[in-house]
Image: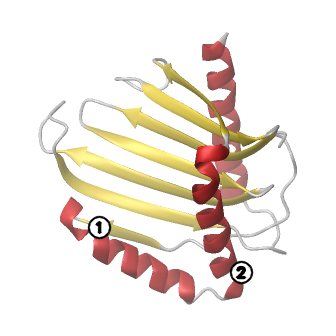
Amino acid sequence: MAPDAPFSDGFHMPSCTSSTRSDSTSWQARTLASIRGAGDSARDAQHRVAQIEAELPTLRRDSANVLEMSTEGTTIIADYRGRELRRLQATFLGESGRAEETYYFDPSLIQVNRRESVYDAPLSGQIEQSTARRYVFLEGKEPTPLRDSLMANARALLAALAQARQ
């Protein structure tokens, strides 16, 4: 998929916050309940994301560590089926926490997951609080500034990955 391809779908954005990692099961249940309320398009997006995750072992993977994108470095992983981008994942490390973003494409952007974690002390790696957001883009909706912003982020990640691989 070309990173500058146009998109014509909208989004549904359930978000949840959990105070500890042990709360991840209830976070998933609340998020899935929110998505269920969004209708068939959101369920279809979840099914397509599950298919992408299942095919990961068969996909071509490019990865790189990039120091310029966060204080402690960023790991970028792009998974492709042929020339088509299927999943783009970035982990941004900082002194006080980390952020993880995962973009799913089929062939256009269908979902973005973002998790931000705050450490209990600088550089400890022990997560004190975590916030997760899931953006599900629905078919047939008008373009939105949020989706455009997320696509700009994805393009920047792909550009950083390409530069780091040279």
For label 1, the residue is 24
Which quarter of the picture shows residue 125? top left
Q: Alpha-carbon neighbours of circle 1 within 10 Å: few (<14), some, or many (≥20)?
A: some
Residue 40 image point, x, y percent:
69, 87
Residue 54, above or below 5: below
Q: Residue at x 40, y 23 (%)?
A: 73
Residue 103 at x, y percent in the picture: 61, 50
The residue furthest top is 166
Badge 2 marks a residue whose secondary structure is: helix
Q: Disc 2 designates what residue?
A: 41
Residue 70 visible in the current orientation: yes
Q: CA distance from mark 2 to mark 1?
A: 24 Å
| Above or below for 56 versus 83 | below
Q: Please name the amino acid that badge 2 sits on.
A: Ser
Q: Are marks 2 and 1 in contact (CB under 8 Å)?
A: no
- SS state under label 1: helix
Instruction: Please tell me which residue is depicted at 46% across the width and 86% down the height of the picture.
Output: 33
Percent across and percent down for residue 95 are 25, 29
Q: In this rendering, would 92 be left or right of 60?
A: left
Residue 20 visible at all: no
Give how far across and how far down residue 48 sits, in percent.
Answer: 68, 67
Q: Which residue corresponds to the image point at 34% horizontal and 59% vertical from the top-left?
A: 131
